[in-house]
Image (tube, rainbow, N blue to C red):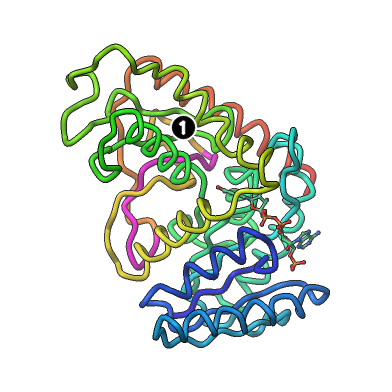
Amino acid sequence: MKVSVIGASGRVGRAAAFCLAEENMVSKLVLFSRKESVEKIEGESLDMYDAMAAKDQRISILSSCVMDNLEDSDVVVIAAGIPRQAGMSRSEIAIPNAKIIAEYSRMVAEHSPNSIILVVTNPVDVMTYVALKSSGFDRSKVFGLGNHLDSLRLRNMLAKHFNIHVSEIHTRVIGEHGDHMVPLVSSTSIGGILLKNYALDGTLDMENMVKKVINAGSYVINKKGSTEFGPAYAIANIISTILNDEKKILTVSAYLDGEIKDVKDVCLGVPVKLGINGIERIIPLKMNDNETNAFLSAAEFVKKRTDEVMRSLE
Ligand code: NAP
C-alpha cells in the first residue's frame, strides 16, 4: 500500500516516514517536500533504504516535489507547516499554517482523490477542519493526530507512577490537542480495574499529572527544539490501524456532527473506530460533569479559532 508524507524534510515528517518504512503493509512511500528541500529528502530516502536493507524490509521510497507522484496514495500525511518555537502556543501559527494546509489539501484531492488525509500540522484540530473543507473529502477520510499522542503521554505517566507495564493502562485524552484537552479520568483503568477502584495509596496527584500531559509537548520542545519520535510512532499507529483494517478505537481529531454532547461543525479529538476506509464510527461517550464541561469548553474554544481561521482564508 502507498503512503505519502508531505513535509517529509521536517523533523516530524521525516521521523514518521522512517517509522512507516518499517510497517509491513507499506510497500510504497513517497517523501514529498517543496522544491528547495528536495536534496534533503533525497538524502533521507537513501539513508532509509540503507536502514531497510539492514532490516530485510522491501520497500520503494520515492522523494519528490511533484504532486503527480502522490497519485493513488492510500494515506497522505500532512506535516508541513511552521512549527512552534519554545514559548509559542499552537494557536499562534494557525493562520499561516492554514494557508499551507488548504493548498496541500486541494492538491491531494486533485492528485489522489481516493486517499485518506492524516493532518499533523498544528493547531491540529483547526487544521483538520481546514483540510476537510479544502479537500472536499468525506469526513470519514480526513482526521488529525493530536489526542492519540496526548493519550500515550498520560498512559506513560500512569505506567511510571504505578510501575506497571504500559499495556495495562487504558486511558484516553479527548477535546483539543492543546490547553483544552480533556483527560477521561473517570474511565481510566489499570488492568481492567477503574482507577477509582484501584488500590490507590494516596500518592497519585492526578491534577498535577494532567498539567504535565498538557505541557508535555512544550517541555520536550524547550529541551530539544521539537518533538519527533512520539508523534512519529503515534502517526505510524494510526496508519497501521487503517492499512491493516484493525478496527481499533483510537483518539483522532474528527469532524463532529452532534455525535458527542451535541457538538457540531468542529473538529475535536474523540474516540473513533478506525479501519481501511478511515473513520467507521465516532464512539459515543459517557463523561462525568467536569469532563463534559471541559469538553464543551474545548469545543467552544476550537470552534471560535476555526471560524477566525476560515475567515482568513476567504
Ligand atoms: P519542521 O521540522 O520545521 O518541518 C516543517 C516542514 O514544513 C518543513 O520541513 C517544510 O518542508 C514545511 N514548511 C515550512 N514552511 C512551509 C511553507 N511556508 N510552505 C510549505 N511548507 C512549509 O517542523 P516539525 O517539527 O516537523 O513540525 C511540523 C508540524 O507538525 C508543526 O506544525 C508542528 O507543530 C506539528 N506537530 C504536530 C503534532 C501533533 O501531535 N499533531 C506533534 C508534533 C508536531 P518542505 O520545505 O521540505 O516542504
The residue sitting at 41% across, 39% down in the picture is 151
Left-right relation of 171 to 307: left
Asked if residue 25 lies in the magenta stretch, the reply is: no
**Is residue 226 or residue 147 the one in the foreground?**
226
Work out which quarter of the rendered image holds the N terminus and state it.
Answer: bottom left
The residue sitting at 48% across, 55% down in the picture is 139
Residue 201 appears in view? yes
Q: Is residue 65 above or below residue 105?
A: below
Magenta: main secondary structure: strand
What x and y, as percent, mark residue 116? 48, 66
What x and y, as percent, mark residue 230? 50, 51
What x and y, as percent, mark residue 294? 47, 21
Question: In the image, which residues are magenta?
Answer: 265-278
The residue sitting at 69% across, 82% down in the picture is 42
Left-right relation of 278 to 165: right
Disc 1 residue lies near ligand 1 with CB under 8 A: no
Q: Which residue is mark 1?
A: 263
Q: Is residue 150 above or below residue 290?
A: below
Name the residue type under label 1: Val
Q: Is residue 40 above or below residue 174?
A: below
The residue sitting at 34% across, 62% down in the picture is 241
Left-right relation of 54 to 311: left
Left-right relation of 13 to 87: left
For ligand 1, the image quadrant comes to: bottom right
> What SS does tag 1 mark?
loop
Query: Badge 1, how many Cα within 10 Å: few under 14, some, many 20+?
Result: some
Residue 314 appears in view? no
Which residue is farthest right? 36
Residue 270 falls in image quadrant: top left
